[in-house]
Amino acid sequence: MLVLLAFQYYPLWGNIIAFQDYQPYLGIGKSLWSGFDNFSVIFSGDPEFLNAVRNTLILTLIQAVIVFPAPIVVALVLHSLLSNKLRQIVQTIIYLPHFMSWVIVVAVFQQVLGGTGMINNWLRGHGYDPLHIIGNVEAFRALLTSQVLWKDTGWATILFLAVLSQIDRSLYEASAVDGAGRWRQTWHVTLPGMKPIIILLLILKLGDSLTVGFEQIILQQQAVGVDASEVLDTYVYNNGILGGDWGVAAAVGLVKSAVALALVLSANKLAHRFGEEGVYRG
């Protein structure tokens, strides 16, 4: 509780600088009030802000369609393995990237896919043209998605595997007696058993949907440029920390948090309408 209060709730007081012409050397108490002036970049259609919003929404959609279902698929595949030893080996291998920092993950991808990386060196050695992936604007979103999949998919399967282990085996036996094959069992037994945790994680993901990987992107932003890689988090960093426009950065961050909260509450309300418990009971 003390950790949550110190690092999650107490910093919320800092959102007040969104309504100030904040100067670090004066502090919150002595900085002049500016009202809603800092929010003008949001409502006046600032091109840099709109570009950050567009990139954020595109990456959010990609992650919702590709990244979120990936652990579910992997969990189903691992659950179907007959050999427990093979399942444990595969689980151990796919868990490992989660414990690497984004600095290491980006470095690994550069060593493999970079201009002088392993793949391009092999292609040159066999008379083929090298691939331009790292630093390629058109391939940047695909690169980000592949990095997230490689790093976090294995770790995210833990919850789904735990749920799968709790499904009553007699349901599979009864469906087999009724003539259901593996696909029918998956559709009518496995997926319904996973539905509550899928809905819960989807609701929580909505709250984090506008956060698409600050560290991952900022480490690679210089290679592709701001136009292709700027998202809301890097916009706050570049304009606030680097640009010194603290009030505007805080205003953008505050609006982003408010939208995320609204998404979570709306999704939870929708889950209640479909008979699910969601994050909390209605």
Image (cartoon, rainbow, N blue to C red):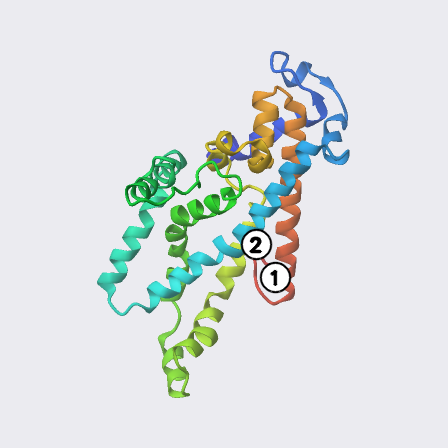
Q: Nearer the viewer, residue 199 or 124?
A: 124
Identified by mark 2, the residue type is: Ile
Q: Which residue in the protein does label 2 denote?
A: 203
Residue farthest bottom in this picture: 178
3D distance between C-alphas at marks 1 and 2: 9 Å
**Residue 4 point in image, percent of width and height:** 50, 36
**Contact? badges 1 and 2 (CB < 8 Å):** yes
Q: Quadrant of the C terminus?
A: bottom right
The residue depicted at 47 percent of the width and 36 percent of the height is 135
Q: Could you classify mark 2 by the number of other residues whose Cα lies within 10 Å: few (under 14), some (14-19), or many (20 or more)? A: many
Say which quarter of the image contains residue 244.
top right
- Residue 246 position, x and y percent, is 63, 23
Q: Is residue 96 visible?
A: yes
Query: The disc labelled 1 sits on which kind of residue?
Result: Ala
The extreme left residue here reads 85
The residue at 65%/60% (across/down) is 270
- Please tell me which residue lies in front, 196 or 183: 183
The residue to which callout 1 is attached is 271
